[in-house]
Image: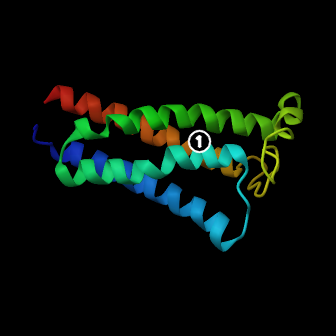
Amino acid sequence: MQTLTKKAENLLLIIWVQAFVATAGSLFYSEVVGYVPCELCWYQRILMYPLVVIYGVAMWKKDVKMSLAGLILSGIGMFVSSYHYLLQKVPAFHEMGGSCGGPVPCNAIYVNYFGFITIPFMAGVAFIVIFVLHLFLLKEMRRK
């Protein structure tokens, strides 16, 4: 097992906090506000929720190798969130979102802060932050 530098530990902590905040936000919108998640929202949740555990255990064990699955999940999550955002905001994609299975169409927009920040946008930003910081973490581990 490798020892982590202080920078690597801080990166792991920031990644974990990002995953935790994204998970908490997701649960807030569904459980407190009462928004019913669409099918693509569920896929994004499936990709985000394990990141809290993965990066938490990696931080606790001080082992970056344990968190490789997080890089893969966040990479897939970026694409799912991007597609979901396109369904909501691009008219050419908008029609495809109505055919999403489940009680809520995937092109439904619950929040629209500043005219462009929707729930898939926020999830996409979280996935991108986690992915990029994980790449920085890998770079830091190679430099050691």
- As drawn, the residue found furthest toward the front would be 102
**Left of 126 or right of it: where is 90?**
right
Q: How many marks?
A: 1
> Residue 136's spot in the image, x, y percent?
32, 33
> Residue 45's spot in the image, x, y percent?
56, 50
Residue shown at 18% from the left, 50% from the top: 61
Q: Badge 1: how crowded within 10 Å, few (<14), some, or many (20+)?
A: many
Quickly name the residue at label 1. Answer: 124
Question: Which three-letter amino acid code belongs to the residue tagged 1?
Answer: Gly
Quarter that holds the N terminus: top left
Residue at disc 1, secondary structure: helix
Residue 14 visible in image:
no
Residue shown at 76% from the left, 57% from the top: 111
Which sits in the foreground, 39 or 108? 39
Residue 83 lies, with reference to residue 37, above or below; the image says above
Identify the image's colour scheme: rainbow, by chain, secondary structure or one colour.
rainbow
**Left of 79 or right of it: where is 95?**
right
> Residue 68's spot in the image, x, y percent?
32, 34
Residue shown at 60% from the left, 31% from the top: 79
Displayed quadrant of residue 106: top right
Which sits in the foreground, 92 or 44? 44
> Residue 103's spot in the image, x, y percent?
81, 54
Residue 33 lies, with reference to residue 116, above or below; the image says below
